[in-house]
Amino acid sequence: MDQDSKVLLIGALAGAATGIVAAMMLQRRARQTGTEVSLTAGEGVQLGMLVLGLVRAVVALADKDPN
């Protein structure tokens, strides 16, 4: 397996693991409050902005000059 494939596989696994943890947290919140699992529009926008910020941080790490 070449380097590019390894990076993509690790990224996919990390993204899937993050998604599973987030879903588990949503389920736990719903159980504690006695409601159904749901996100409001505001929470969805907030989550999307956080994910974009994370992606920008990862890209910034890749753009650093190694010297």
Image (cartoon, rainbow, N blue to C red):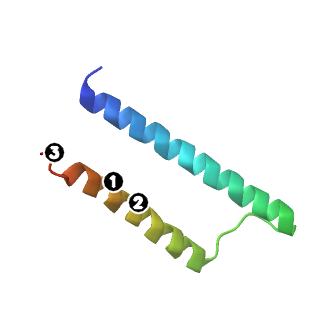
Measured Cα–Cα span from mark 1 to mark 2: 6 Å
3D distance between C-alphas at marks 2 and 3: 21 Å
First in sequence: mark 2 or mark 3?
Answer: 2
Circles 1 and 2 in contact, beta carbons < 8 Å: yes
Image quadrant in which the N terminus is located: top left
Secondary structure of the residue carrying tag 1 is: helix
Q: Quadrant of residue 8?
A: top left
Amino acid carrying mark 3 in the image:
Pro
- Which residue is labeled 1 in the image? 58
Q: Is residue 10 above or below residue 1?
A: below
Front residue of this view, candidates 46 and 58: 58
State the residue lying farthest toward the left.
Answer: 67
Q: What is the x, y in percent for residue 2?
A: 25, 23
Task: Residue type at mark 2: give it.
Answer: Leu
Q: Quadrant of the C terminus?
A: top left
Binning the other alpha carbons within 10 Å of mark 3 as few (below 14), some (14 to 19) or many (20 upward) gives few
Q: Quadrant of residue 11?
A: top left
Q: Residues within 10 Å of mark 2 (few under 14, many from 20)?
A: few
Percent of width and height locating residue 25: 70, 56
Q: Residue drawn 70% across and 51% down? A: 24
Look at 52% across and 43% down and name the residue there: 16
Residue bearing mark 2: 54
Which percent across, then down, holds residue 3? Answer: 26, 28
> Label 3 to label 1, Cα distance in Å?
15 Å
Where 10 sits versus 50, above or below?
A: above
**26 relative position to 50: left or right:** right
Front: mark 2 or 3: 3
Identify the residue under disc 3. 66
Task: Report whether 60 appears left or right of 8.
Answer: left
